[in-house]
Image: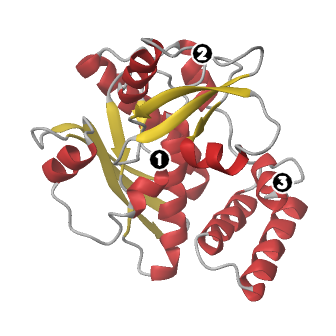
Amino acid sequence: MAEPGGICISGKVRDEIRDKPFYALTDLGEVEVKNISRPVHAFRVEIDGAAADPGDKTKAVAARASSAEGPRILVLLFDNLSCDPDQKYFSDGLTENLITELLRFSDLHVLARNTTLQYQGRGVDIRDVGCDLEVDFLLEGSVRRAAGRVRITAQLIDAASGDHVWAERYDRDMADVFVVQDEITSLIVSALASARGVVATTAGRQLVASKAPEDMAAYELVLRFRALEAGAWTKENFLSAQGLLERAIEIDPNYARAYTKMAR
């Protein structure tokens, strides 16, 4: 909702700071925001001046916040079809990576990973999910690992009709998992470009590609950290998570994601 370089806050935050010296605030009224079912009372921080009379700006901001630019897409957690149920961390990690890569395309409106989690382990009706979350497309799939190989299936579904827009299956060596990930992202964007006019720029495609870590073992350790991160932060889990990241950094000192997770 904020203008470039600006800040908007909720009414709850305003209540916490209202008795402290602060910038002037402009009341934007009740606005609809992404992934929150009820309207939120919002305020704009006036960094360079006094609060203004919101007038028609309130309606303009509310309309902008509630409108989705481009198609809305939900990436459901990929199913773990491996014989080992502990491999779920890998399928969850692939799901999170695909969400991150799709977010790099400004024409797509990708729902947050937390939205995906509410459907974990549930048999869902595609059209019901599409209606509940007001999404246009859903991406779902599965992952199976065995003997250094990985099979990944993915399908893009029109939420309104339940029809398949695109589907593919990949059988590759584990070392090629990042190539598959980039290919899935590219094909999804191409399919959406045909269906909804999404602009898939060359720069956007290049940004998605070429980010694989130098060592698969480091990548595996970071994925195992993510599985711990999703649970309770007990002392045991904390120390285990720290150990996983230390090993990942030792294996691949240039793996930025391991450093960001360690800092977190």
Question: Which mark identifies residue 5?
Answer: none
- Image location (x, y in percent) of residue 210: 67, 33
Q: Does 256 appear above or below 258?
A: above
| Amino acid type assigned to the residue bearing label 2 in the image | Ala
Q: Quadrant of the C terminus?
A: bottom right
| Amino acid type assigned to the residue bearing label 1 in the image | Ala
Q: Does 102 appear above or below 263?
A: above
Write the residue at 30% across / 26% down: 191
- The residues bearing labels 2 and 3 have C-alpha atoms spaced at a distance of 26 Å
- Image location (x, y in percent) of residue 152: 40, 55
Question: Which mark identifies residue 112?
Answer: 1
Nearer to us in this view, 198 or 182: 198
Write the residue at 49% across / 62% down: 92
Residue 177 visible to the viewer: yes
Residue 147 visible to the viewer: no
| Amino acid type assigned to the residue bearing label 3 in the image | Tyr
Q: Which residue is mark 2?
A: 203
Q: Which residue is mark 3?
A: 259
